[in-house]
Amino acid sequence: MEITGAGRTDRGVHARLQVAHFDTEAKRPPSAWVRGVNALLPDAVAVLWSQEVPDDFHARFSARARTYRYQLLNRPVRPALEAHYLGWFHQPLDVDKMRAAAALFVGEHDFSAFRSSECQAKSPVRTIHEFTIETSKDRIDLVVRANAFLHHMVRNLVGTLVYVGKGKHPPQWARELLDSRDRARAAPTFGPEGLYLERIEYEAKWNLPL
C-alpha cells in the first residue's frame, strides 16, 4: 500500500500534524483505521482521525497552504530539556529588524537563494502569504505560511533572519538575496530542532476535520 503525505520534513524536524491518503479496497469504519494503525505506530506518532474522501482528493496537491513555526531560544545559555525541540542563538537579536526583513519575503518570489542543492522541485517560485515573528520572554517564534515550500527553505530563511537580527546585514539584504537567486550568498541553514509543521489547509469542500 502506498501512502502519500501532504509534505515531508527533514530529519530532526517535527510535525504537529500531517495529512495522508491511501487507496484501499478494505472496508472498515473510520474508527477501526485509527485504532488499528495506532496500535502499530511508535509512541511519537498517533493517528487522530480517518475518513473516506473522493477519488480526486490528494493529500499533497489538494493542499492550499502550509504553515511552519520555528521556535528559537534567544539567550546566552543553551537549552537543556528542550534541546531537541528548540533552535538556539546565544547573541541578542533585534526582532524589529528581523520583522522588516521577513516582510520582504511575503509575496510570490523565486526562492532559489533559499533552496537546498538537493531540492527536487521543478520550480523555485513560491508564494509566502504571511511571515510573522512572535516573542515571549527569551523565545522568538518565526511563523511562515505559504502555498508550498522548497527543501530547507524555512531553515534557510531563519538563518538569514538571524544574520539580520544580530546585525551582520541590514533588513534589505533579504531583497538582495531574493534578487541574486544565489544560495551561496545567503546565510547557512539553521538547525532542524526548532522547526514544526504546524498547519495544512484544504478547501472546505473536502470536509476534513482540521
Image (cartoon, rainbow, N blue to C red):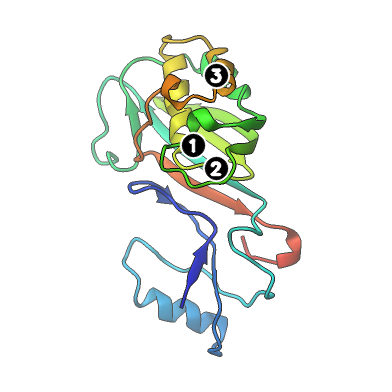
Give the crowd class for mark 3: few <14, some 14-19, many >=20 residues within 10 Å: many
Q: Which mark is residue 11?
A: none
User: Residue 174: which numbered mark, if any?
Assistant: 3
Q: CA distance from mark 3 to mark 1?
A: 13 Å
Looking at the rendering, which quadrant does residue 46 occupy? bottom left
Answer with mark 3 or mark 2, whichever residue precedes in sequence: 2
Q: Position of residue 205 (x, y in %)?
A: 76, 65
- Between 68 and 119, the residue placed more toward the observer is 119
Where does label 1 land, which residue? 153
Residue shown at 53% from the left, 89% from the top? 26
- Judging depth in this view, the residue of 130 and 83 nearest the camera is 130
Please give the label number shown on residue 149: 2
Q: CA distance from mark 3 to mark 2?
A: 17 Å
- Crowd band around label 1 with a 10 angstrom C-alpha radius: few (<14), some (14–19), many (20+): some
| Residue plotted at (55% across, 19% down) | 174
Q: Which quadrant of the figure has residue 144?
A: top right
Give the answer, above or below, for where 37 lies relative to 207. below
Cβ atoms at labels 1 and 2 below 8 Å apart: yes
Circle 2 Cα neighbour tier, 10 Å, few/some/many (<14 / 14–19 / ≥20): many
Three-letter code, disc 1: Met
86 horizontally vs 15: left or right: left
Residue lying at 40% horizontally and 31% vertically, measured from the top left: 72
Sequence-wise first label, 3 or 1: 1
Disc 2 element: loop
Residue 163's spot in the image, x, y percent?
42, 17
